[in-house]
Amino acid sequence: MLEKGNIYEAVITDYTAEGQGVAKIEGCAVFVPNAIVGERCRVTIEKAAKNWAAGKIVEILEKSSHRVQRQCPISASCGGCDFWHMDYEEETRLKAQRVTDCLNHLGGETLETVEILAAPDCHGYRNKAQYPVASRKGRVYAGFFKAGTHTVVENKRCLILPEDTDRVKDIVIDYVNHFRISAYDEAAHKGLLRHIYVRRGAVSKQVLVCLVVNGRKLPHAEDLIARLQEVPGFTTLVLSVNTKKGNTILGDEFIALYGPGYIEDTLCGLDFRLSARSFYQVNHHQAQRLYDAAISQAGITKEDTVLDLYCGVGTITLCMAKAAGKVIGVEVIPQAVEDARENAKRNGIENAEFFCGDAGAAALELERQGVKADVVVVDPPRKGLNADAIEALARFNPRRIVYVSCDPATLGRDVALLKERGYAVKNAMAADLFPRCAHVESIVCFVRK
Ligand code: SAH
């Protein structure tokens, strides 16, 4: 076992899923943040367990040619991003490698490194921010959590957000400090404001401001609304009531204090209504490329019925509607299903139907009722497909399955399960929707064997 406090010399040979460097020291895996593969460093051990340890760079003896000056001055402490210390070439290389490794090691594939759709721009791409708030000496501030903690690192200007989004945050913080509105204190479960959530349509430029509060009322709301009028495109102010303890950001109840409670945006040539509670990909440009890839891999014809599981506001479903005979979307969040139905109407799409429920359970029920699916698209959250969803896919026995994933590990697991159910991987690729952050999307197309 390595000793805490000791300094060892090591070479970084790999990355964790969270983007930390990995070095092997005396047979033990040591996780080293802010390290780049190929670098030789002196590492101090901060925590030592039996088979692994957490280390910290004391000195870099041999620097990677991919190491760059950090453009974000607070990125070493802010947990929002992971990769400001390396160039984008290394970031996309490691992301493609991670997807490939998961498909090979967990999914039993033997792929060469998969292609990655790299982003053209790492700045200002996020259309959504959720800033936690905290207070110090009576002053409230906002930022992002330090990695692995709930300590808020104050953020004046976040480089992956548009300036207007940070401006909304500043306006809310000024208003909060002006009226002495309290920040939520997790330990005491007291205080009002928990998160400032801002979503801005990349095309429409409409801005939704949602304040997550431990209560049901916002004092001096009219004053905040007046201040927010300064922000170009400000469309709606919503309260999200979250009086529960725990990590979940949004509450279940939403109260529109100004405007309709949703914004609109255009994606892949279609118009979408987006409620505060509904999922919408944060990187508009890269989402369009991802959906284009999904559509082309689905190989849909006019005779086909397409089932889109985990459909959100119907983005992929409606993009596929034109090429298909019929499309059916399934989504668990009621507000998102309402958005999806409304979105079909807005775009004059008449061959789309949406159901609210757990994707697996709803798909099994549809199959029981005799619905046929020629092509199935799945885009689950990080935990991947549950047993019902896998069973439903096997029973539908579609010609193709297009799996869009935000976690390569659960994707790898599900690839193995779908292979047992008679499917083969035809195509796999990665897509970078989160430049500077460790998350990576991927897309796999399966064909029936
Ligand atoms: N395909 C959509 C949404 C993908 S995100 C898009 O690209 O915009 C995953 C979606 O799955 C979210 O909308 C989430 O609310 C939904 N979801 C999560 N668990 C679910 C479940 N058990 N059944 C159905 N939908 C679920």
Image (cartoon, rainbow, N blue to C red):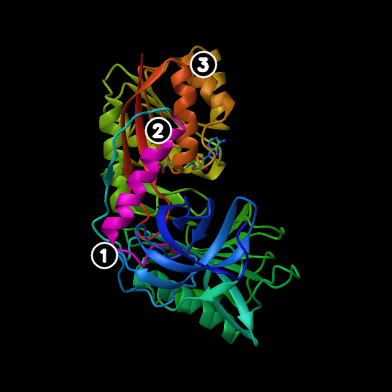
Q: Is residue 152 above or below residue 359?
A: below
Magenta stretch, main secondary structure class: helix
Q: Is residue 184 above or below residue 111?
A: below
Image position of 87 (left or right of 164)? left
What label sits on residue 104 in the rendered view?
2
Q: Residue at x 56, y 37 (%)?
A: 332
Residue 93 painted magenta: yes
Q: Circle 3 sits in a helix, a strand or a loop, which is it?
A: helix
- Image position, residue 5 (x, y; %): 60, 71
User: Which of the two discs, 2 and 1, sits closer to the camera?
Assistant: 1
> Residue 253 is drawn in which quadrant?
bottom right
Q: Is residue 400 above or below residue 336?
A: above
Say which amino acid is labelled 1.
Ser
Q: Nearer the viewer, residue 342 or 160?
A: 160
Q: Nearer the viewer, residue 311 or 418?
A: 418
- Image position, residue 169 (x, y; %): 47, 74
The answer to whether one can see residue 168 in this image is yes
The answer to the question of whether label 3 and label 2 lie on touching residues, with beta carbons closer than 8 A, is: no
Is disc 1 surrounded by few (<14), some (14 to 19) or many (20+) residues within 10 Å? few
Q: Which residue is mark 1?
A: 65
Is disc 2 surrounded by few (<14), some (14 to 19) or many (20+) residues within 10 Å? some
Q: Earlier in the sequence, mark 2 or mark 1?
A: 1
Q: Earlier in the sequence, mark 1 or mark 3?
A: 1
What is the span of residues highlighted in magenta in the rendered image?
80-107
Say which amino acid is labelled 3.
Glu
The answer to the question of whether label 1 and label 3 lie on touching residues, with beta carbons closer than 8 A, is: no
Q: Nearer the viewer, residue 186 or 112?
A: 112
Question: Is ligand 1 less than 8 Å from the beta carbon at label 2?
Answer: no
Which quadrant does the N terminus fall into?
bottom right
Q: Earlier in the sequence, mark 3 or mark 2?
A: 2
Q: Which residue is mark 3?
A: 367
